[in-house]
Amino acid sequence: MKEVSNKAEEYLEAIYRLQERIGVARTTELASALSIVPGSVTNTVQHLKKQGFVEHRPYKGISLTPKGEQIALGVIRRHRLAERMLTDVLDAHWASVHESACRLEPALDGDLTNLFEKRLGYPRYCPHGNPVPSEEGEIEQNEEDMLTTANVDETVIVSRIIDEKRDKLLPLVDKGIKPGVEIHVLEKRDYSMVLQVAGKRCALDLESASNVLIKTHKVDEDVQKRK
């Protein structure tokens, strides 16, 4: 029997993703990520706190305990391997697999997840460039910055895309932005950045740019392999 319910796993995964992006998960942001009302979040978070999966400090947000993080990483492992199965075996487009993987992951147990991993050749990254946690709950950590921090006239390489939802990816897909792609920053404006991608000039709003993690032009081969 699973240690936690599918609903609890969904919450822990969402908290992990918010922590990864902004350092902490606040109730309103968690509600938005899960597409539910804040009141429902409060009740479930209190239940998760009693189980020892999260810490919740009023006005300071929600964070995972080591126990909660291990469960979240297990969910993320299943999710990212499911995404790779969809792209690598079924030829699904990388920008459309997140939602399908969300439906697949609850059906994957540890043994089946390991079989996915073996069949795929032990991939290190999901189609969006995010690292696949190991069976032991370890995950690769890299020094990366948001695209919004890049300077004018700087050339960078897209390392990964944090938020994998289709509506968040479409503005990037339209401009050819994906892991491994080279970007040259032409201008920085109040609400957008002007970029050169694959020889084409384009404008990207700052919200979308904050979803893109980069490394400088002098980058190791691992990033190129995430394409």
Image: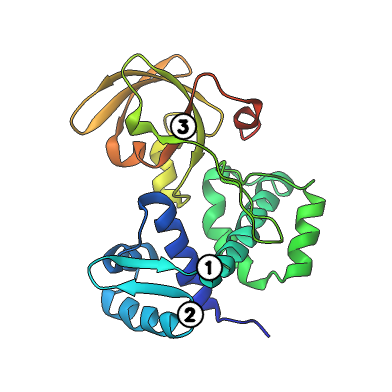
156, above or below 3, in the image: above
Residue occupying image coordinates x 30% and y 62% = 29
Residue 91 locus on image (x, y percent): 68, 44
C-beta proximity under 8 Å, tags 3 and 1: no
In the picture, the disc for residue 66 is 1
Q: CA distance from mark 2 to mark 3?
A: 34 Å
Q: Residues within 10 Å of mark 2 (few under 14, many from 20)?
A: some
Foreground: disc 2 or disc 3: 2
Dot 3 or dot 1, earlier in sequence: 1
Which residue matches tag 2?
52
Which residue matches tag 3?
214
Dot 2 or dot 3, earlier in sequence: 2
Q: Nearer the viewer, residue 45 or 108?
A: 45
Quarter of the image with the C terminus in it: top right
> Dot 3: what SS?
strand
Q: Is residue 36 left or right of residue 76?
A: left
Question: Which quadrant of the view contains residue 47?
Answer: bottom left
Q: Hey, what amino acid is under mark 2?
A: Gly
Q: Nearer the viewer, residue 155 or 142?
A: 142
Q: CA distance from mark 2 to mark 1?
A: 9 Å
